[in-house]
């Protein structure tokens, strides 16, 4: 900021414009004085041509040149800033996190653990893991992975995976085998084509139990081995659950708001203005600034707006709550059943605890519960 004192200030402003000096936010302080913002280069130009009848004084400077000039005078701050920048640059040479894309959450956790044993893990030096070797080793060890790529995005190691389409298991009718239960079930029917049936209609079996044996040993006769063949239909139950409060909240804004600035570094956050002082509030992100881009730390400044709300509780209609919970729990159970399974029915049990209603749906299916296991396995 500068302050100009003298007469004919309008002529001074016009002359500054003709000479290419831009004045920002110019305002008249008095009849003979005005204040305005100007760049460092513009200030030098003003001093070079301004007539002597104008007295030009500089106030506090803003911007990078003025900031650097003040920092030079404060060596302790300058040294601290330099050390901070060097620490940030050094931190970018390490892996802060590993993200796995293309597979389910649980498969991703397994792959992340395996990559960690190979050296690709948080806080590992980027130059240490041999990414090409890791990719080759993973492809050799996992037939279910068709393609894999690992690259760094800032301080995050991104692992992209394309799962392979596995061919269906081929049943070899010449190899002796047993038919065992794939899951717990209540046996509905047994169709034996080869081997000897071990279970009958009405039996309850656990996963792994033999249903049709490929080993036939009759008294006084030699042991005979067969490739057991047949179909065992069983009743299988799948459970789905859903819960919801018996009271629903109505949130009405009071009109009071509070702004907050939050620094986001990776998965960590720190508030610059302190936590929200409202007891109940809704939060919206009004803006976000990224610092450093892909080549630096993932540092962001997030601007939040907290709106105070008044919360009231109203009971949810009982029938509506039951129907919604049953539907949600039913589809959760249905998602666990194999594709093509015959749905025989379902049963729902409701429970109420601590103002929460829970629906447990038991979905009954009819499905082929057997699978072949070769005897040498």
Image (tube, grey):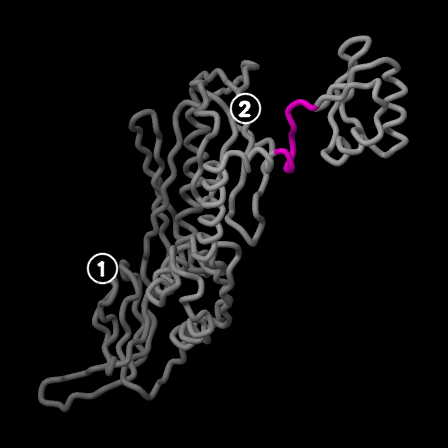
Image coordinates of residue 282 in percent, x first then y, are 51, 25
- Residue pointed to by mark 1: 204
Q: Dot 1: few (<14), some (14–19), or many (≥20) neighbours within 10 Å?
A: some
- Judged left or right of residue 85, residue 363 is left
Q: Dot 2: few (<14), some (14–19), or many (≥20) neighbours within 10 Å?
A: some
Image coordinates of residue 327 in percent, x first then y, are 45, 40
- Residue pointed to by mark 2: 259
Is 359 in front, or is 261?
A: 261
Image coordinates of residue 137 in percent, x first then y, are 40, 75
Question: Which residue: 78% across, 15% down?
Answer: 5
Q: In this view, does 246 lie above or below 229?
A: above
Image quadrant assignment for residue 316: top left
In the image, which is nearer the foreground, mark 1 or mark 2? 2
- Judged left or right of residue 310, residue 372 is left
Regarding mark 1 in the picture, which secondary structure is present there? strand
Is 166 in front, or is 365?
A: 166
- Give the alpha-carbon distance from disc 1 to disc 2, as whole Å: 63 Å
Q: In this view, does 214 lie above or below 122?
A: below
Is 11 in front, or is 347?
A: 11
Magenta stretch in the rendered image? 58-66
Q: In this view, does 366 lie above or below 253?
A: below
């Amino acid at each position: 900021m500068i302050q100009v004192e003298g007469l004919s200030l309008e002529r001074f402003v016009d002359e500054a414009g003709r000479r290419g000096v831009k004045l920002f936010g110019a305002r008249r302080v008095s009849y003979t004085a005005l204040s305005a913002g100007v760049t460092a280069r513009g200030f030098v130009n003003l001093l070079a041509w301004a007539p002597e009848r104008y007295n030009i004084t500089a106030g506090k400077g803003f911007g990078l040149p003025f900031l650097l000039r003040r920092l030079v005078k404060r060596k302790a701050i300058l040294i601290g800033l330099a050390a901070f920048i060097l620490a940030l640059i050094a931190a970018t040479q390490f892996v802060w996190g590993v993200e796995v894309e293309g597979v389910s959450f649980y498969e991703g956790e397994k792959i992340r653990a395996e990559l960690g044993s190979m050296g690709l893990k948080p806080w590992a030096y980027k130059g240490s893991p041999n990414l090409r070797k890791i990719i080759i080793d993973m492809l050799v060890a996992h037939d279910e992975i068709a393609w894999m790529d690992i690259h760094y995005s800032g301080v995050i190691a991104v692992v992209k995976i394309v799962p392979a389409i596995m061919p269906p298991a081929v049943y070899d009718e010449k190899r002796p085998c047993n038919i065992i239960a794939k899951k717990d079930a209540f046996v509905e029917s047994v169709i034996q084509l080869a081997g000897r049936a071990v279970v009958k209609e009405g039996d309850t079996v656990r996963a792994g139990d033999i249903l049709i044996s490929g080993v036939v040993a009759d008294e006084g006769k030699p042991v005979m081995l067969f490739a057991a063949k047949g179909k065992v239909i069983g009743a299988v139950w799948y459970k789905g659950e859903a819960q919801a409060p018996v009271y629903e909240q109505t949130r009405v804004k009071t009109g009071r708001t509070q702004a907050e600035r939050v620094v986001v570094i990776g998965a960590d956050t720190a508030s610059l203005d302190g936590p929200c002082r409202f007891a109940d509030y809704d939060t919206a992100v009004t803006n976000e600034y990224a610092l450093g881009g892909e080549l630096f730390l993932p540092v962001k400044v997030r601007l939040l707006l907290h709106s105070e709300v008044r919360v009231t509780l109203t009971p949810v209609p009982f029938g509506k709550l039951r129907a919604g919970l049953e539907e949600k729990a039913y589809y959760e159970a249905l998602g666990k059943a194999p594709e093509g399974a015959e749905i025989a029915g379902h049963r729902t049990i409701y429970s109420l605890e601590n103002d929460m209603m829970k629906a447990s749906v038991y979905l009954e299916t009819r499905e082929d519960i057997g699978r072949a296991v070769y005897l040498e396995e």
